[in-house]
Amino acid sequence: MHKNSKNCHQVISFYKFINIKNPLIIKELIINFDQINNIKGTIIISKEGINGSVFGSKSILSKFFVIINKNVSNDIIKNANFVQKSPFLKFKVKIKKEIVKIGFSYQGVKKKGGIHVSALKWDKLCTEENVVILDTRNHYESDIGSFNNSLLPNINSFSEFPSWVNKNWDKIKDKKILTYCTGGIRCEKATSLLISKGNLNVYQLKGGILKYLSTKDNSSNFNGECFVFDDRVTVDKNLKKGKYSMCFACGSAISKVDFLSSDYKKGISCSKCINKTSKEQKRRFSERQKQINFAKQKGIKHLGQT
């Protein structure tokens, strides 16, 4: 891991389910802070809470979370790690109906949620009998890394998770269910859903994979790398930038082998999406890539450029 250094910057992902009466006020407070301090990242605010990932120096982010603690909650769930440069191109603050989209609101999470367990307890629970280790992430995340013996729903988006649960309920309803995701937020809603259907024996990995990797060594039972939603694409077990890049046509993580495939055309297609996009989509992707290449030749930073 990166050493705790004053010269290093941090990426901190965070969330909190809490009633926010006026998300616009919180958005304005955050934007005003950014205009002075120039942090980068993405933050989503709704009436059900806040969810984000931000980049900046330790001192600036410390000031940022003073604002969040004072105006949102002093009990924010955070994952932090040190990086040398920003994995974000810019700073965005959005107001949405849900801070993580599944189809139901914070009220369900507030009333019922899984039992949070630490990394150490998680490993012990994973060895017990009659256990289901349930990955609540999307297939392109699970494809590059997961816990041993995980059940992978193979969904395209989190909003498909309720449908998957309904179809597979008989297989898991009598099991002890251990859920995990990247940083913990999706498990808040996933466990709420599982409990509402009648299974009270539900647990979630506190802080998700990122917190687990920050507290475990390389003997952990997580195999592969962890997909993250920024320019790093993936992080390894030491929370350093991983070996994967991204296909900017479909958003999937792709390896060096994928780059050698005849299906790979930069910004247009890869072996994972070449048969899933139309000719018109490929034409648009091609035009976008031409604009990126042109901007690069002129020394201009294009928003689609990596």
Image (spheres, rainbow, N blue to C red):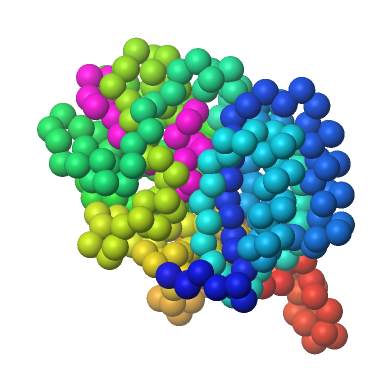
Residue 156 drawn above or below residue 268: above
Q: Looking at the figure, which quarter contains the N terminus?
A: bottom left
Q: Nearer the viewer, residue 274 or 45?
A: 45
Residue 188 in the magenta stretch? The answer is yes
Using the rendered view, name the quadrant where residue 67 is placed.
top right
Please provide percent x and percent y for residue 284.
Answer: 74, 61
Q: Can residue 43 be seen in the rendering of this structure?
A: no
Q: Residue at x 79, y 71 (%)?
A: 302
- In the rendered image, is residue 130 in sight? yes
Horizontal relation, residue 170 to residue 112: left or right: left
Closest to the observer: 48 or 171?
48
Tell me: residue 214, above or below residue 149.
Answer: below
User: Residue 197 at what x, y percent from top left?
Assistant: 39, 14
Q: Is residue 121 left or right of residue 99?
A: left
Q: Indicate the position of residue 55 as horizontal and vertical percent values.
A: 66, 61
- Quarter location, residue 171: top left
> What is the span of residues highlighted in magenta in the rendered image?
172-189
Q: Residue shown at 37%/64% (left/top)? A: 237
The residue depicted at 57 percent of the width and 35 percent of the height is: 75
Q: Is residue 7 magenta?
A: no
In the foreground, 58 or 205: 58
Residue with the most extreme left position: 129
Location of residue 49 (image quadrant): top right
Q: Could you tell me which residue is drawn at 26 percent across and 46 percent down?
A: 120
Q: Is residue 191 left or right of residue 6?
A: left
Quarter of the figure that contains the C terminus: bottom right
- How many labels were placed on the picture? 0
